[in-house]
Amino acid sequence: MKAAQGRLNDVIRFSAVDGPGNRFVVFLQGCNFDCIACHNPYTINECDSCGICVEPCPEMALYFDVHSRVVVDEDECTRCDICIQVCPSDSTPLSQMVRLDGLKKRIHEVSPFVSGITVSGGEPTLQSDFVASLFGSIKCDERLGRLTTFVDSNGHATRDVWDRLLPVMDGAMIDLKALDPDTHIAMTGQPNHLVLDTIRYLAEWDRLYEVRLLIVPGRNDAPDAVEKTARWLYDVDPSLRVKLIGFRQHGVRPQFADIPEASHEQLATLADVIRSVGIEDLVLV
Amino acid sequence: MNMEEFRSRARDIVNDPTLTFHQRKHYLAWLAENALEYPSLSTAAAEALNKQIICDLFEGSAPYRGRYILPDYGKALRNGSAHLELDPPTDLDEALNFLLIMYTQVPSITGYPVYLGDFDKILAPYVTDDISDEELYRKLRLFYRALDRMLPDAFVHTDLGPHDSRVARTVLRIDRELLQVVPNITLKVDPEITPDDLLLEAVATVFETGKPHFVNHPLMVRDLGEDYAAVSCYNSLKIGGGSHTLNRLNLKEVALLHQGDIDSFVEETLPHYVELLAELIEARIRYLVEEAQFFEHDFLAVEGLIELDKFSAMYGVYGLAEAVDLLMEAAGKAGKYGHDEEANELSYRITRKIADLVAERPMPYCEGNNGRAFMHSQSGIDSDLEVTAGTRVPIGEEPEMFDHIRAVAPHHDLFQSGVSDIFHVEDTVRRNPTAMVDIIRGAFREGMRDFTFNLATNGFIRITGYLVRKCDVEQFDEMGARHGSTTFAAGSVKNSHVTERYVKRVLSRESSPRAPQ
């Protein structure tokens, strides 16, 4: 199925941290996880036009349109983010539907400077038809055809979703919050069987660029749990690239303000644990 | 300057505890030169010079050597030198020894050679297969250390590329290890020739030392021919030639003096001052060639290692950002250079106009560019205050990198002899150097001529195209500096807003040529 429109949160034209080389990154709106460690919780839900943000906007850039939907006057908006701070629904009035050709025009602008594009979020697989359309049209475009197409996903998607993406997707970065199902539910609100299956499936198809392990102190940082996770990943693919990321408070919701950040020493220790099972391609962030 | 003032200033230099013996001697020579009469100028040009609307970069009142000289070292090595009593070298040791000797005899505005040759090309005949990688490394390392200690000036420059080579790789490796200011390096990049892994090696070197600077090889070849080099900082000129002089037009001052609309600025006020600067350049060239007769007696010219007909002069501009913003403001428009489409268009109109005028203005002894001066976007000197270098976007006001590149790139086509925009990047790129390779290649695809980036977290600050070590700048006030250019940088850092920069961006300055006052 083709989708000519997607719900966009924002784009970053140059990113050095979202896959190989310099990349144009598309952040889609909407996520099926509710992670305690989420750095951009305003991408989780779609805006329900409750209007709570309209009055606090200092630029008066937000208003109700004739359909009682909250819309933004782009010329007035200064991206001060007050609307995001007052939003009770982990959303933003600034996300908007974007047309495929409009997005492609922006990719054309930066194409001389990038290795490829990465679709992130939010959770991009929730809009897999749009992502597949976007990637497909990039691959068929004379000037954009050389760009690689990557997905940055929580992995919570069924095989038919990946089957739609695989013909046009060069690689995926998948987050694995925990191997233990209960820990996973506690950290994300969802079970992890789809995530684990995604990792296996993409590795089989040789499209798994990296698996990211976010270490959240007190939640998933027990060395034996990390070792178990590493063993499981090693069994999937011994040459797998693993990125070990320490939790940071930046952007996290106030109710999780008491979660401590991971120290450099702790990460170094866990890195040794991961390497001890045979994983060599390990990146620390 | 009367005799009393002269004596007082000479005394200050002689007694300045922050200057080395060599630096004192250099400034004393500068002071003596400036006690002489200036080459004859019209009243209008003399007044513009006096008010610093046009500026000679304090090169001195009686030019007796070209500003930038690019000897043909390849030819010197092939033929030997009668003046230096050196036979052509027969192996790598002899070649490196030959070059070290020759460097001490190459004049320039700074007193040190601004060009050391393209190491990979000039050494290629001596880097034979029987020299192992380790042996090559050891020999070049000693040579490299000697350069920094013997020629302590950050404007001393070598070029590498666009082809891959053992010498290029080894030089980059040594640069990362020794963390020296000297030599500065340019890598010539040709999309068809330069491999990604050489670029990656270069990017990894920038992470440690802020070097090399990257140039768009095909664009340079179009404007200068195959035998060109980037020297000093961002000054691209012909090998075997050079630039007699570099003078510059302060566009901000021109805009401040202008009364009227944008059209009359471009069509009347600007051409008037463009010609005054041309007059200044011509007078300085004539003095150098006809009065000081540099090309009649210097051994480089006598032995054919430089040729007058490969020389030209550099026509510099700066303060474009302020000029554009002032003109926009006078026209009742709020758009700023670097951010607003209309302001950017105006900036292109201004540089295009200057380029057209310079291309129409015959210049004596400039056969290196068909009898015309080279356009140059000048990077500033340490005494510049509240005026932005060259055609750059003001410090702290730079848009994000993509918009920044798009705003400045259209100027690059016009400035054959160099244009400097420095991009400071986030430290995260250390983990993904390919991202920088993408951006460098993209910048050249988009028509940029020069590309420089640096990280906030290495030990070097790029002041213009030249680098200084952060620790040297911090210690300068107390202890003085071994490198002449650190003296310049200390003034530059104080007078600019280095610490206020967006991702600690450093303002660029070409040099501080005057004696401290």
Image (cartoon, grey):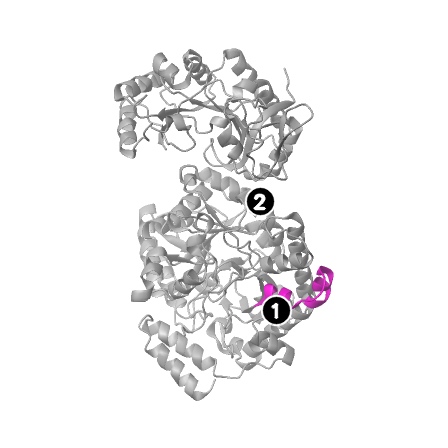
- Residue bearing the label numbered 2: B403
Please, what is the three-letter code of the amino acid marked with disc 1? Cys
Taking the spot 44% from the left edge, 29% from the top edge, the residue there is A39
The crowd level at tag 1 (other Cα within 10 Å; few <14, some 14-19, many 20+) is many
- Name the mark on residue B192: none
Identify the main secondary structure in magenta.
Answer: helix
Q: Which residues are magenta?
A: B248-269
* Circle 2/circle 1 CB separation < 8 Å: no
Q: Is residue B297 above or below residue B264?
A: below
Q: Tag count in the figure?
A: 2
Compared with B191, B249 (above or below) is below
Q: Does B219 sit left or right of B462 as displayed?
A: right
| Secondary element at image label 2 | helix
Q: Residue A103 location in percent, x, y?
A: 62, 30
> For residue B252, which quarter of the picture?
bottom right
Q: Is residue B265 magenta?
A: yes
The structure residue drawn at horizontal position 49% and vertical position 67%, both measured from the top left corner, is B69
Q: Is residue B390 above or below residue B105?
A: above
Q: CA distance from mark 2 to mark 1?
A: 36 Å
B304 left or right of A137? left
Frontmost residue, B417 versus A29: A29
Task: State yes or no: residue B266 in magenta.
Answer: yes
Quarter of the figure with the C terminus of chain B:
bottom left
Residue that mark 1 sits on = B366
Rendering coords of residue A280 (x, y %): 33, 27
Marks 2 and 1, the one that precedes in the sequence: 1
Could you say where residue B379 lies in the image, as x and y percent from the top left? 52, 60
